[in-house]
Image (cartoon, grey):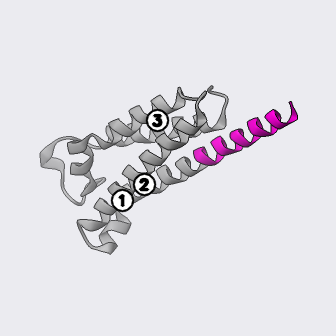
Amino acid sequence: MIQRVQSIYMLILVLTNLLVIISIDSNPEMSLPESYFGFFRPYINDYFFSEIISVLLIINIFLFKRPNLQINFLRIITLSLIFGLLNLFDERSFEKSITDPALIYFLISFFFIVLSIRSIKKDLKIISSSNRIR
């Protein structure tokens, strides 16, 4: 399970989400737009965005025997990340949104989700080719 490359990608995503959880101070006095994860802070704190995605990814790692379900979980996580990205750009100007560190979080998350899906599909191809040989 852990030697599979998609599990490692998902673990990196879990660690990224844990880093976001730790780096965001939940002190309401400190939630200024100039701070780290500026306007994205209420979205994460109010909806427990990173915690939910981390739990889904951990569940997804243990579903290694059901790769189609893993791909569907990753697609659901991608849709929630798209919602968060749209929320990031909706609340302020384009220039401020591009300079926000939350954009880096979204780019890293999308990158590792694409790599995970690609690896799972590669495993499915290997399995189907071995089934043809039998």
- Horizontally, is 8 left or right of 73 in the view? right
Badge count: 3
Q: Main secondary structure of the magenta part?
A: helix
* Residue topped by disc 1: 85
Q: Residue 131, located in which quarter of the rendered image?
A: top right
Residue drawn at (67%, 28%), measured in percent from left and top? 3
Task: Give residue 57's mark.
Answer: 3
Alpha carbon of mark 3 to alpha carbon of mark 1: how far?
A: 19 Å
Tags 2 and 3 touching, CB below 8 Å: no
Identity, as a three-letter code, of the amino acid under mark 3: Leu
Task: Give residue 99's mark.
Answer: none
Alpha carbon of mark 2 to alpha carbon of mark 3: how far?
A: 15 Å
Alpha carbon of mark 2 to alpha carbon of mark 1: how far?
A: 7 Å
Please give the range of residues in magenta: 116-134
Residue 124 x/y as whole percent: 69, 40
The answer to which of 19 and 119 lies nearer the viewer is 119
Q: Earlier in the sequence, mark 2 or mark 1?
A: 1
- Horizontally, is 26 left or right of 103 in the view? left
Residue drawn at (35%, 41%), measured in percent from left and top? 50
Residue 48 x/y as whole percent: 27, 40
Report if residue 38 is visible in the image: no
Q: Earlier in the sequence, mark 2 or mark 3?
A: 3
Q: Residue furthest left?
A: 29
Q: Is 119 one of the magenta-colored residues? A: yes
Q: Nearer the viewer, mark 2 or mark 3?
A: 3
Task: Give residue 106's mark.
Answer: 2
Q: Earlier in the sequence, mark 3 or mark 1?
A: 3
Residue drawn at (34%, 37%), measured in percent from left and top? 52
Residue 83 x/y as whole percent: 34, 56
